[in-house]
Image (cartoon, rainbow, N blue to C red):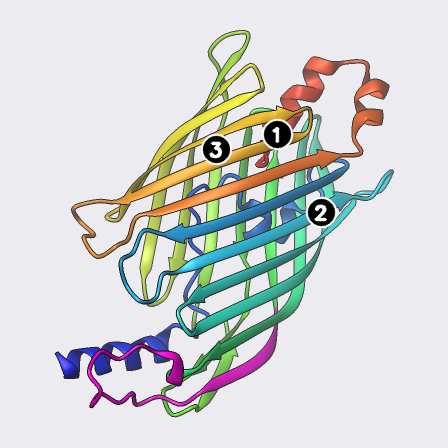
Amino acid sequence: MKFILTSLLVWMSCTVFAQSEYLRFIDYTIAQPLINPATMGVEEGWNGLMMYQSCFEKTDYRPALGAFNINSSIKDKNLGGGLSIIYDKYGPYQKMAAYLAGSYKLKVNEGKFLFFGLQAGINYVSNDPSKYVLHDPNETLLMEKIDLSQPNFGFGLHFKADKYFVGFSIPEFLYNYVDNEGKKESGLVSEKLKLYMYGGYKFDLGKNTKLEPYTYLTYAEQENMKMDLGARLWYRESLVVGMQYRTKEAFGVMARVKLFEELWLGYAFENNSEAAPNFNSRQEITISFRFGKKGNRSSSGDSEKYDENINSIRYF
């Protein structure tokens, strides 16, 4: 048991800092601005997202993740921009990332647009072995204290139409690796690939009801490819419910409700499947908002088209 505990913590200190690990969200449909810089400013006006995720884990180190994004399009320009901040914590291990992103919109056809995005920022990682809880007083950890900051940058594509969307992104082109002796390695993404791909289509089931099946693919070199298959049901542009399955890992359910005209509250829960008994159940709480778009609605004179365009993207 002593050997297993020491080996596990050493392995975690070696692998948790590698950029090949990817952010895991329950509801990727709302987390797009956190993983793809091309989605910055896809919706006109100001758009914001706040997210908190925690695990139902009975250990000394309960994982938690917090994220914030604010983005906007630039009026009368084909440009958008935004800021993302992500904080990831697992016991004494902490990682914070802050990125500024920009996007460019290219009209492909009537009602169809392709967005190109770039982001640049900094990652901060820390790990203090002295803060690990050891139940055996004779136990020791073979790892060094880590405290470092490194720059990074990413790229993404996002295609939007009234009824569907597809996207691809590599959020971090550089990888940073620290072993248990504190030795740092770095390189290009070709050696430690991490990418996201996704797509979805919306069907009209009735005047007030829409169904949107979607899929999200995530790939990291050390964890192989994972696929999220799910569907969301929209009702009266005020309520969204959905469910999904992550291959060989977990089942999830989610719901979002409109509290006010431009403010939504969401909750998602994910439970491990029998194929992944060591994967912990998680919950995710989101608050999303939009402001500064009323002028666009009145100028179009077509509120129905305006509402349809809102729902073809990721926030609501």
Q: Secondary structure at mark 3?
A: strand
Give the residue type that dot 3 points to: Gly
Residues rendered magenta in the picture: 130-152
Give the structural element (helix, strand or loop) at label 1. Answer: loop
CB under 8 Å between discs 2 and 3: no
Please tell me whether residue 167 is drawn above or below residue 298 in the rendered image. Answer: below
The residue drawn where x is 72% and y is 43% is 41
Answer few, some or many: residues within 10 Å of disc 1's Cα (few below 14, many 20 plus, some between 14 and 19): some
Q: Quadrant of the N terminus?
A: bottom left
Residue type at tag 1: Ala
* Left or right of 1 in this view: 74: right
In-image side of 234 versus 294 (left or right): left
218 or 25: which is nearer to us? 25
- Label 2 sits on residue: 71
Query: Earlier along the polypeptide chain: callout 1 or callout 2?
Result: 2
The quadrant of the picture occupied by the C terminus is top right
**Side of 142 relative to 4 (left or right):** right
Residue 103 seen anywhere in this rendered image of the structure:
yes
Residue 43: give x, y in percent of width and height: 70, 36
Task: Point out residue 108 in the picture as x, y percentages from the top left corner.
Answer: 69, 35
User: In the rendered view, would you say 191 is above or below 99?
Assistant: below
| Residue where numbered disc 3 is placed | 200
- Are there few (<14), some (14-19), or many (20+) residues within 10 Å of tag 2? many
Whichever of callouts 3 and 1 sits on the residue coming sooner in the sequence is 1
- The dot on residue 161 is 1
